[in-house]
Image (spheres, helix red, strand yellow):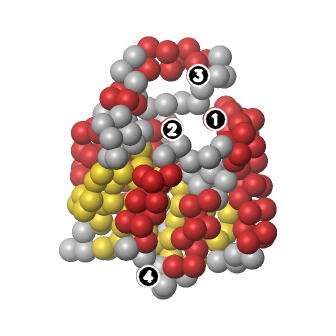
Amino acid sequence: MAASNFWDRTADKYAAQPIADEAAYQVKVAETRRRMRRDMNVLELGCGTGSTALLHAPYVQHIRAIDFSRRMIEIAQGKAEGAGISNVSFEQGEIEALALESNSFDMVMAMSVLHLLEDKNQAIRTVHRVLKPGGYFVSSTACVAEMIPLFGLVAPLGKRLGLLPHVDVMRAPQLVGALEQAGFAIEHQWRPKRMAALFVIARKRAD
């Protein structure tokens, strides 16, 4: 629960911060929306304060949005109520412990979350299992080993002191390899600049 406690403490500050690269964010929103349909059932992992889910809500049937931070979910629910959006359900939960039916979602989103998981490979396998054949996995992931080369030296100490959450210090080829090994076909990948997060749209093969 240490990760949950960290994000609970930082949730209000996080919610008040502007998006670091608004132009890049809008590109990701547009690329995701190109794959959406009105009849889609969507799962979002690590939804934070709900901004992305609420933006996409008018374009799909339903979004189930999960985050392990209680405070993040409280903020997200307040946003949904304020905007009158009823087809997004927010809930607190650990990704690893979710009871999810196989082949039950048309799309799974995981924005800025895979690098924060203790076992990203298991999470990717779970996403593949719960997606319908032909379904999309949309992710944006900080490949920290490339963005901050020395971060791997300070991350363990920061985690022990409660100053940082768990961070998987990975490179882009490791992430892409994990997706392909789980059975995904990479349909689209993009970085607005070399040091930015890697945005990937992968598809579960229909055959």
Separation (CA) of disc 3 from disc 2: 11 Å
Residue 66 lies, in percent from the top left, at 61, 57
Q: CA distance from mark 2 to mark 4?
A: 29 Å
Q: Which residue is mark 3?
A: 159
Identify the mark at residue 116; answer none if there is no mark.
2
- Is mark 2 in CB contact (under 8 Å) with mark 1? yes
Task: Identify which residue is drawn at 71% across, 59% down.
Answer: 76
Dot 3: element = helix
- Read off the residue under disc 1: 3
Q: Check disc 3: other Cα within 10 Å, few if <14, some if 14-19, many if 20+.
A: some
Look at the numbered discs 1 and 4 and tell me whether their residues touch, using CB distance below 8 Å: no
Question: Disc 1 to disc 4, how far (Cα)?
Answer: 34 Å
Tell me the distance, in whole angstroms, between the alpha carbons under discs 3 and 1: 9 Å
Q: Amino acid at mark 3?
A: Lys
- The quadrant in which the N terminus is found is top right
- The three-letter code of the residue at mark 2 reads Leu
Considering depth in this image, is 118 or 151 the residue closer to the camera?
151
Is there CB contact under 8 Å for labels 3 and 2? no
**Residue 160 appears in the rendering:** yes
